[in-house]
Amino acid sequence: MTFSLRSCSHSAHNASALTPDLCHHGNTRAVSQCMGNKMNGSVGPMRVLVTGGSGLVGRAIERVVKEESGEREEEEWIFLSSKDANLMSAEETRAVFERHRPTHVIHLAAMVGGLFRNMRQNLDFWRNNVFINDNVLQAAHDFDVVKVVSCLSTCIFPDKTTYPIDESMIHNGPPHETNFGYAYAKRMIDVQNRALFQQYGRRYTAVIPTNVFGPHDNYNIEDGHVLPGLIHKTYLAKKEGTPLQVWGSGRALRQFIYSLDLARLFLWVLREYDEVEPIILSVGEEDELSIKFAADAVVEALGFEGDVIYDTSKADGQFKKTASNAKLRKYLPDFKFTPFRAAIKETCDWFVANYDSARK
Amino acid sequence: MNGSVGPMRVLVTGGSGLVGRAIERVVKEEKLLAKHSSDTRAVFERHRPTHVIHLAAMVGGLFRNMRQNLDFWRNNVFINDNVLQAAHDFDVVKVVSCLSTCIFPDKTTYPIDESMIHNGPPHETNFGYAYAKRMIDVQNRALFQQYGRRYTAVIPTNVFGPHDNYNIEDGHVLPGLIHKTYLAKKEGTPLQVWGSGRALRQFIYSLDLARLFLWVLREYDEVEPIILSVGEEDELSIKFAADAVVEALGFEGDVIYDTSKADGQFKKTASNAKLRKYLPDFKFTPFRAAIKETCDWFVANYDSARK
């Protein structure tokens, strides 16, 4: 996999437009494809491309868009998965943009994994995510996409820091050693957004969720994240009548956000949030929970009655990553998050009902 | 990796630039075979190097960086990934890349040292270039973590010497000063220095840097980068450097400081304590002598010099 050097062309309109006409941007395009780019509140007709559309967050967005009147009139939503394009390839990425001509992009696609996989493969996590992100951001720019909302993570923040962390602190020091490859690749999305703004005035931005959970997660025990891993392990422990083994001490603290809440907030960011600086999307600091608390909720939701053992020989990862959601609350003081136990119950119910097809 | 290395075939990317030419000159003085090229995988295929000195980059002065952060970020990430990955795939024993003190955190204590590279955002004016260079260190560490590769990097302060880019708009401060002084003398006009002249820099002569590069290639075993610079006590103001250029070129007109132009970072004082720990006796060429040599080269090679 190599990068090919490209000149940064401002737009890539080709001759396939019907009757070329000058839209009000001064670009030569078919009038029917000219999309408004009003950024404040109302947007014109939108064609939204969602990369990583089959993943945890992508599925939640799809559900909110389809089932909760999230889809507005004259909006078209396209959910991509790795089957549609390998985004590590610049050519395949561009082909997708060529085919769909999106006005907006929600960029969720990434190489992700749990603590232990990251620790072993920092180079792969770094390189593959840099490729994916550059391919998507550059194609978006070249195809004159009005707005891209990418997805960062609180695990990319500086390891040595004061708490709570906020959006201004992303680059204030090295990330945790265990996943520095992934962390730097994600940070560089923000760098590229700012560079696109500085050089071209693009207002591409990013969100920073805390730990996401919900249906359609990756429940692989080796490689997945902590909550889906717990759900799967509890399910198996119940089925096999064995103890539940939780990795780590159980004392590490996390803020969890239900994927459906995240999806609702993503749509707000796409339509209303104008800043280039990212925004943390999370429950408040007061809702930070220990892994033990989360494990207990899973045990309760699945009706597990066996022993729960904490394997302290396994790493905890970062002890805490407390993030401030003050910026979000400034914009949306009344947004209601789904209560944790109810969200865990829904997620566990989904997992039990979809065990065979769930990613694991 | 300790001291003696077996037969080495060293590929130098960016070999035609300021530092590459200095390395070439030092290497030839040592009667070693040197090749230089600007391609990646095809070149690795053709030359099968055992070692790489990676100097190639998209570089520019303050003003060009300020306007094109995206290009500086992307193009340098491409170049660096292509070289580092090809080196890994072709089982290159060691790659020595080239960072810069301009990539360090803007808000920081002084002097800066090798452990501080990632401790905060770089200066806003060249964040694209700065992050791309920082990511060389990230990729080196990831290559070490995943594959045990001991690729490393050096961090020179402001380099100057023959074969520089003397373009006044896009070049760095010293070659820009040299070119402007040359023209001012020729045309009988004042010398206009951009900025207040008060910004401070440590300058390293390209030939000194080249000698140190060879030592790093052969002897330095760490993955963490190493600052290659004169000491903190040799930090100079832009005004001092301008005066040295004026003297070396025999310019007798007025020198005017245009304070409407940006100074860039006021200071970037770097510690060379790690270098001195390894090489306590290394002698740097005295600044005025190095400036004289550089100016003499520029005058003699004006027509062909990059500008």
Image (cartoon, coloured by chain):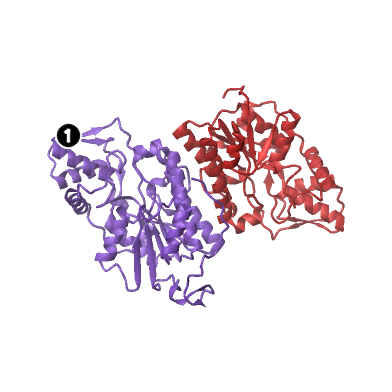
Chain colours: A purple, B red
Q: Where A53 falls versus A104 (above or below)?
A: above
Name the foreground residue: B187 vs B70. B70
For label 1, the residue is A243
Q: Where A176 falls versus B76 (above or below)?
A: above
- The chain ID associated with circle 1 is A
Q: Secondary structure at mark 1?
A: loop
Q: Quadrant of residue B233?
A: top right
- Tell me which residue sits at (30%, 49%) in the image: A255
Q: Where B76 falls versus A245 (above or below)?
A: below
A258 left or right, relative to A128? left
Name the foreground residue: A256 vs A253. A256
Name the foreground residue: A219 vs A295. A219
- Tell me which residue sits at (30%, 40%) in the image: A252
Task: Look at the image and tell me whether residue B193 can be seen.
Answer: yes
Residue B18, percent from left and from top: 71, 43
Name the foreground residue: B301 vs B177. B301
